[in-house]
Image (spheres, helix red, strand yellow):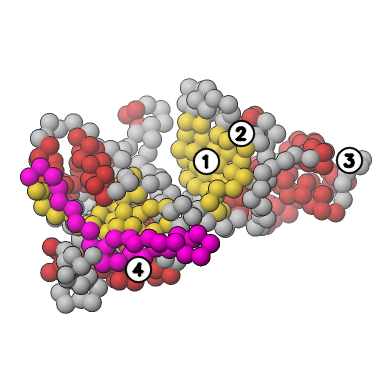
Amino acid sequence: MTAEVTPITRRESDGDTIRQGFVERIHDQVIRELDLRSLEKLPDDARRGRVEASIGAALNSLPGAPAGVARRQIVEQVAAEVLGLGPIQALLDDPDVSEVMVNGPREVYFERDGVLHEAEAWFRDAEHIRRVADRIVAPLGRRLDETSPMVDARLPDGSRVNVVLPPIAVNSPTITVRKFRHDRFDMNDLVRIGSLSEQAADFLREAVRCRTSILISGGTGSGKTTLLSALSEAIPETERIVTIEDPIEIRLRQRHVVTLEARPAVTSAKSAVTQRDLVRNALRMRPDRIIIGEVRGAEAFDMMQAMNTGHEGSLSTVHANTPRDALSRVENMVMMAGFDLPVTAIREQIASALSLVIQVSRLPDGKRCVTAISEVTSLEGTVIGLQDVFRLERGFGPEGHVQTTLVATGVRPQFADKFGDRPSLPAQR
């Protein structure tokens, strides 16, 4: 069921308080009467029907229970408590909501079209948030207590969830959910919504086909993974792909794909499997392409090594504000590998491994778009050379909306000879 969420500040009324009282009483009664383990064996529709019937019976047994719309709201709230994640379940069911953030019992926010709104959902108290958090991590075998107050996990539908407990979260337990999109975007979709131009899309498709190693740079929620998934569609079906993620987000349409996921430490540090472990192992799996969902640490060294030793055309993302910052971040992460390498040697390796850096950003109006496509050239002295192949031009349209156009700079990339005579190649100056 899709939630009807109005982006206004939540103000609790007397009617809300009365309804919440009924919700608490009925929830406790339904939990006592239902066998939750047997419910898990039922199909979704049958399970929900059984729960709603029990809620209806409990309402009928209470004097003064509301009717009409108020009664339906109580049924929905209690069903969400029993079957889902309580007050935020309606937001998670809304396909237009991309993120849900619980800062406290009366502070619940959601993101729609790149803009934050305060939700009408609310929790009774901090303990209520804690119970929902425990319900998230319990099926995953993850630990959530005062000795392990932070957890990154994944919901059954693939959505990413982060939970932080006091005393780390000072005022209240917090829950942050980044929803997993089932209607994945391809390159044509990104062109249609204005994230990049048709010419830039053709250029990137051809770059992927020609085994150009690409790094996608951007901030949190800027659309890096979305673009990475769209780019991967240009990889030929004849190639073997190994993906490495923490957690899994990329969905590929090719058939010959091996998916690896890092594992956090459960009982001891030795039980952890890091992305670096997976990159090393992937090299023994005869990959044509290696895709790392996001490079975060010492695995950057192994990724550069792979790109320089026969695994051209690999793809990854990194958190950075500009293409230049992205290269600096990769350099710092290579240093984290623990090898005492000269800075010049590291930069030579990066310049040799990477061919393109794509910068993506989220604009003030919430729009996500490619702001630059830059070629990595050779090492120039002690600096890695960068030149823009496409650059974003901005302006303001009616009502102050930002208007953007990704245009070719006229620079001919050094790897352009791989393209042959292709119309997707930017015009030379």
Q: Report crowding for label 3: few under 14, some 14 to 19, many 20 or more residues within 10 A (C-alpha).
A: few
Closer-to-camera residue (132/380)? 380
- Magenta stretch in the rendered image: 381-408
Q: CA distance from mark 3 to mark 4?
A: 61 Å
- Give me the disc on residue 197: 4
Q: Nearer the N terminus, badge 3 or badge 2?
A: 3
Was residue 14 drawn as part of the magenta stretch in this picture?
no
Q: Can residue 360 be seen from the camera position used here?
A: yes
Q: CA distance from mark 3 to mark 2?
A: 31 Å
- For disc 1, the marked residue is 176
Closer-to-camera residue (167/311)? 167
Q: Does the residue at mark 3 contact the one at mark 2 (Cβ under 8 Å)?
A: no
- Give me the disc on residue 62: 3
Q: CA distance from mark 4 to mark 2?
A: 41 Å
Query: Which type of secondary structure does the marked residue at label 3 adopt?
Result: loop
**Residue at 82% in and 38% down:** 14
x%, y% of residue 61?
89, 42
Q: Nearer the N terminus, badge 4 or badge 2?
A: 2
x%, y% of residue 404?
39, 63
The quadrant where residue 371 appears: bottom left
Q: Give the side of residue 84 with respect to residue 426, left or right.
A: right
Q: CA distance from mark 3 to mark 1?
A: 36 Å
Q: Name the residue type under label 2.
A: Gly
- For disc 2, the marked residue is 104
Q: Name the residue type under label 3.
A: Leu
Q: Nearer the N terminus, badge 3 or badge 4?
A: 3
